Image (cartoon, rainbow, N blue to C red):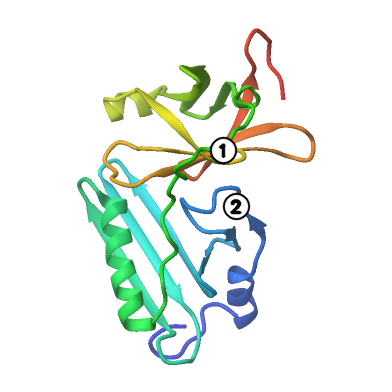
Amino acid sequence: MAADGTRLLSAESAAAMAAHQADLPDQWSLGDSWGLGWIRYDWHGARLVGHDGGTFGQGAFLRLLPGPQQGEGLTVALLTNGGGMVDLYEDLYRELFAELAGVTVPDPLDPPAEPPAQDLSRFVGRYERHSVEIEVFEQDGGLVLRQTAVGAVAEATGQPVQEHALVPVSDGVFALRAVGRSGWSAVTFYALPDGSRYVHTGGRANPRTTRPEEGPTR
């Protein structure tokens, strides 16, 4: 709705944007589900919507807490550049939403002291999406994720290849220490009903294209 009261979007369309459309396999990097455009967040029972964006050296974070009650109707936007953007977002929003709305930001991803036992060979293989190639392989009893940027992205980053040890969290869920972050980032392996397998990392779904000693596969 514009400042003069002119409605730009119908109430029905606005509600549809915030309504549940699809679950996210990674519950830590973004939200728990997606609406029509909005990312949906469950912060200890409080339902928020928002969206993030980023490019090289820049990040944007938007969160809205809808509702008529005291503390609701809060909107916070953060535009930043430089390093440590996600850490800044987490620290700032945790403080603001607790103080202004009494809402607690979910606990960050934290691997257990005793990693769960699981068959790591299920996740080994090559995963690809536009501009990124990912290899997951076993090394020294654990998993390693090697991510290679290709094309224009590789030229722009100046860091085309990154390797990360994966720390088990739960079945199919691992954690890694991303460059420039003090906290953990989630890596989630999963399969669709048709059997195709994916790794979800950095808010992106990457389909598996090959397994060890095999040709292209689902």
Compare marks 2 and 1 and give the one earlier in the sequence. 2
Please tell me which residue is depicted at 41% across the width and 55% down the height of the picture. Answer: 108
- Give the residue type at disc 2: Leu
- Give the residue type at disc 1: Pro
Count all numbered tags in the image, as a single digit: 2
Please tell me which residue is depicted at 62% across the width and 34% down the height of the picture. Answer: 198
Q: Nearer the viewer, mark 2 or mark 1?
A: 1
Residue 140 point in image, percent of width and height: 46, 17
Locate residue 93 relative to residue 126 in the image: left or right. left
Of residue 163 and residue 107, the one placed in the foreground of this image is 107
The residue at which mark 2 appears reads as 24
User: In what element is the residue under mark 2?
Assistant: loop
Whole-angstrom CA distance, mark 2 to mark 1, is 22 Å
The local crowd at label 1, few if under 14, some if 14 to 19, many if 20 or more residues have their Cα within 10 Å, is: few
The residue at which mark 1 appears reads as 116
Residue 193 point in image, percent of width and height: 78, 40
Please tell me which residue is depicted at 50% across the width and 71% down the height of the picture. Answer: 44
Name the residue furthest right.
194
Residue 98's place in the image compared with 161, above or below, is: below
User: In what element is the residue under mark 1?
Assistant: loop
Please tell me which residue is depicted at 28% across the width and 45% down the height of the picture. Answer: 182
Residue 93's place in the image compared with 179, above or below, is: below
Of residue 174 and residue 19, the one placed in the foreground of this image is 174
Residue 28 point in image, percent of width and height: 48, 53
Locate residue 175 relative to residue 86 in the image: left or right. right
